[in-house]
Image: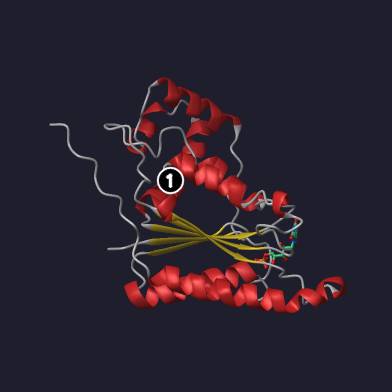
C-alpha cells in the first residue's frame, strides 16, 4: 500500500492559507488515486509538537553512545520518567515518517524561513540514528519522496532582488538531503507574491501572483499523480 504523510504548518485559517489550499489539492488528488487507508495528516500549527526538553537530549546522547540503535530498541535505554515522556512524544512522529512513501509539507514563509511549528517537528523527529538502517548504515529515507509546498508573500526566485533572502528552500534541501532523501525525490513548489492582493503597494504584482498560484496548482496536481522515484538497489557484494 502506498502512503502519504501530509503536514501543514501555516498559522493561518485553512480557507485563507495558500500553502494549506495547495497541500489540500495534492492530498485530494492523491486520495482519488490511492484511497484513504495510507493517508496520515498532521496539523503542526493547530496541534504543535513540543520542543525537545533536557531529557530528550540526555536520551539522545545515551542512544548515540550505543552506536546505531533502531527506534524499536530505544525504549529499553530510557532512564527515567522524563525520558520516557520525551520518547513517547517522539516515537509516533518517527514511525509516521518512516512509514510514508511520500511526505507532503506545507510551508509558509515566515521571516524568510520556515515557521517555528515545522522547526519543532524537525527538531523532535530527527532523533539520533532513527533514519539509518542499523545493519547497512544506509538511510531509511533514500526511497522516500518529499514534496515541499511553500507560500511566500514576496518573490524569491532566481534573479529577483530578494533571491538571497530565501532561507526556506536551501535549509529544507540541506535538512532532507542530509537525512538521505535523494535529489530526484525532493520536490519544491512555490506560490509567490501571495500578499499582492492584500497590500496596496504590491498590487502591481497581482498577475504575477495569479500566474505563480496557477503554476503551483498544476505542479502539485502533477506531483500527486506521479509515482515515487525508486533508486535502483545497490549491487550485492556477496
Ligand atoms: C509571521 C509572518 C511572517 C512573514 N514573513 C514573511 C517574509 O519574511 N517574507 C515574505 O515574503 N512573506 C512573509 N510573510 C507572508 C507569508 O509568507 C504569506 O502570507 C504566505 O502566503 C503565508 O503562507 P500561508 O498563506 O500558507 O499562510 C509572513 C507572514 C507572517 C504571518
Residue carrying label 1: 94
- Does residue 109 sit above or below 221 in this rendering? above
Q: Is residue 116 visible?
A: yes
Question: Dot 1, crowdedness within 10 Å: few (<14), some or many (≥20)?
Answer: some
**Considering the image in quadrants, where does the N terminus appear?**
bottom left
* Nearer to us in this view, 5 or 172: 172
Name above or below for residue 162 compared with residue 196: above
The correct choice, above or below, for 98 with respect to 66 in the image is below
Q: Quadrant of residue 200?
A: bottom right
Instruction: Answer with left or right where residue 160 lies relative to residue 220.
Output: right
* Residue 89 appears in the picture as rendered: no
Assign a secondary structure to mark 1. helix
Q: Name which residue lies at 65% across and 52% down.
A: 114
Picture layout, residue 12 above or below residue 118: below
Question: x, y percentage for residue 228?
Answer: 35, 60
Question: Residue 188 placed where, x, y %?
Answer: 53, 59
Q: Residue at x 38, y 72 (%)?
A: 225
- Spot occupied by residue 159 in the image (x, y as percentages of width and height): 69, 57
Q: Quadrant of the C terminus?
A: top left
**Residue that extends furthest to the left in the rendered view of this protein:** 238
Residue at the image point whose x is 34% and y is 50% from the top:
143
Q: Position of residue 62 (x, y in %)?
A: 46, 23
Q: Quadrant of residue 193?
A: bottom right
Is residue 203 rendered to the left or right of residue 147?
Answer: right
Q: Nearer the viewer, residue 25 or 223?
A: 223
The residue positioned farthest toward the right in the image shown: 201
Q: Nearer the viewer, residue 102 or 185?
A: 185
Amino acid at each position: 500500500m502506498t502512503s502519504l504523510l501530509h503536514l501543514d504548518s501555516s498559522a493561518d485559517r485553512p480557507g485563507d492559507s495558500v500553502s494549506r489550499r495547495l497541500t489540500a489539492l495534492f492530498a485530494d488528488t492523491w486520495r482519488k488515486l490511492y484511497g484513504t487507508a495510507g493517508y496520515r495528516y498532521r496539523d503542526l500549527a493547530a496541534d504543535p509538537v513540543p520542543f525537545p526538553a533536557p531529557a530528550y537530549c540526555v536520551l539522545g546522547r545515551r542512544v548515540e553512545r550505543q552506536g546505531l540503535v533502531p527506534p524499536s530498541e530505544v525504549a529499553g535505554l530510557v532512564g527515567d520518567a522524563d525520558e520516557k515522556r520525551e520518547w513517547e512524544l517522539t516515537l509516533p512522529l518517527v514511525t509516521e515518517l518512516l512509514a510514508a512513501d511520500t511526505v507532503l509539507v506545507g510551508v509558509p514563509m515566515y521571516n524568510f524561513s520556515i515557521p517555528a511549528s515545522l522547526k519543532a517537528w524537525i527538531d523532535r523527529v530527527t532523533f539520533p540514528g532513527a533514519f539509518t538502517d542499523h545493519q547497512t548504515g544506509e538511510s531509511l529515507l533514500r526511497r522516500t519522496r518529499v514534496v515541499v509546498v511553500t507560500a511566500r508573500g514576496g518573490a524569491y526566485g532566481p534573479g529577483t532582488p530578494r533571491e538571497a533572502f530565501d532561507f526556506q528552500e536551501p535549509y529544507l534541501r540541506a535538512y532532507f538531503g542530509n537525512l538521505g532523501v535523494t535529489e530526484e525525490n525532493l520536490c519544491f513548489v512555490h506560490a509567490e507574491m501571495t500578499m499582492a492582493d492584500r497590500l496596496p503597494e504590491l498590487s502591481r504584482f497581482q498577475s504575477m501572483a495569479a500566474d505563480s498560484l496557477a503554476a503551483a496548482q498544476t505542479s502539485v496536481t502533477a506531483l500527486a499523480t506521479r509515482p515515487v522515484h525508486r533508486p535502483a538497489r545497490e549491487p550485492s557484494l556477496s
